[in-house]
Image (cartoon, rainbow, N blue to C red):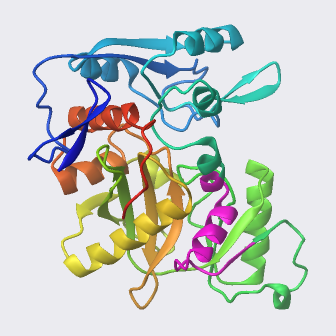
Amino acid sequence: MIIKDITEGKIKKTGVVLPFRKNIFQIKINKSIEIVIVHNPGKKNFHQDNVGIILEENKILKILSKRYTDVSITKIDNKKDLDRLLKRKPDLVFSGVKYFNFNDKKIWLNDCLEAYDIPYIASSRTALDKESDKNLAKKLVLKAKIKTADFFVTEPDQHQHESSIPISFPLFIKPVKGGDSRGIDSHSIVYNFSSFKKKVLEIKTKHNLSSLVETYLPGKEYSVGIFQDSINGTLRAMPIEIIIKKNINGHCILDFDVKKDDEEKVIAVTNKKISRKLSELAKKAFKALGGKSLGRIDIKMNHQGVPHFMEANLMPGLRRGYFYRSCSLNLDMNYDDMILNIANTGLLSNYSYNIKT
């Protein structure tokens, strides 16, 4: 068995397989890791479009410092701060920041890190662009022959008559961009043309976004965490089922308020056949979107129990969210081990390997 030794940057032969392992290191590894954050002007959990993962930076600092010799928190407030980070060239940047806005110019962190050959966690800017545009993401998974609900994108008043709508009611309507189920509520399932027009207008008015309209899938809802093996690039899929109480309209919708108030229940997928189907779909979708290191694929069943791709998150939340619970329920991995494995994978991300499923 061949594994990579991150202490030397070489390949070693060993008889022991060590992916997704518990914290077994007794000595510190001589690596520099910078936990990069930006100023959050709002209260706790304040949403920032340029931040994909809200980090518990002090907690992560404590965890990583147990294994690595040089770990620090770096706050980037301006272009000079970013330039200094790139000049220091740490062994790894551990960050959930997507981009910075300096002088009305958007600068993507991972683009800069790649230009300086600095490893980082999560996916490239190209993959994040694909994932964040739900219309594009669905087109890409369709091209990869992955099932997803029929869909189209629309604006208010684009459809003047019901006959112009290309798919049949009931429909599910959400913003074409954005995470955390923002813009999704009890009115997202529509059964008639009047409700369709009202919801599309609401999304444009409140979020200034186009609407993604899909055939409504009434089946069970799942989320599949993806962890890429730092040794050989193999993808590990970790499916969980999300159980949601019925809302006032009698529907189980994973909307913004349900997520915000932690009203949903998450359980392991014990049916091996279903788990295998979910895992296969998730890994194919992750690969189709160009994912790297870690991510999350959301899946829903249709009325026949056939899994369909819903959307992806290639910068999944780490603070006790679905990704962490995927790790916990499938790999018996605690929070510390999850953070250490993410760092280990990131440190080896500059090694070239093909993603294996």
Image location (x, y in percent) of residue 249:
51, 74
Q: Which residues are magenta?
A: 130-152
Q: Nearer the viewer, residue 192 or 73?
A: 73
Q: Quadrant of residue 306?
A: bottom left
Image location (x, y in percent) of residue 301:
43, 79
Image location (x, y in percent) of residue 167:
71, 87
Q: Nearer the viewer, residue 335 or 14?
A: 14
- Give the residue at x 14% y 48%: 17
Q: Quadrant of residue 197?
A: bottom right
Image location (x, y in percent) of residue 233:
36, 51
Horizontal relation, residue 283 to residue 209: left or right: left
Residue 299 visible in the displayed image: yes
Above or below: residue 318 compared with residue 142:
above
Residue 250 visible in the displayed image: no
Residue 13 colored in magenta in the image: no
Above or below: residue 274 compared with residue 244:
below
- Give the residue at x 58% y 35%: 47
- Give the residue at x 57% y 70%: 141
- Give the residue at x 25% y 22%: 63
Q: Nearer the viewer, residue 229 or 148?
A: 229
Image quadrant in which the C terminus is located = bottom left
Above or below: residue 39 compared with residue 156:
above
Counting every numbered tag in the picture gives: 0
Horizontal relation, residue 333 to residue 280: left or right: left
Q: Nearer the viewer, residue 74 or 156?
A: 74
Horizontal relation, residue 223 to residue 158: left or right: left
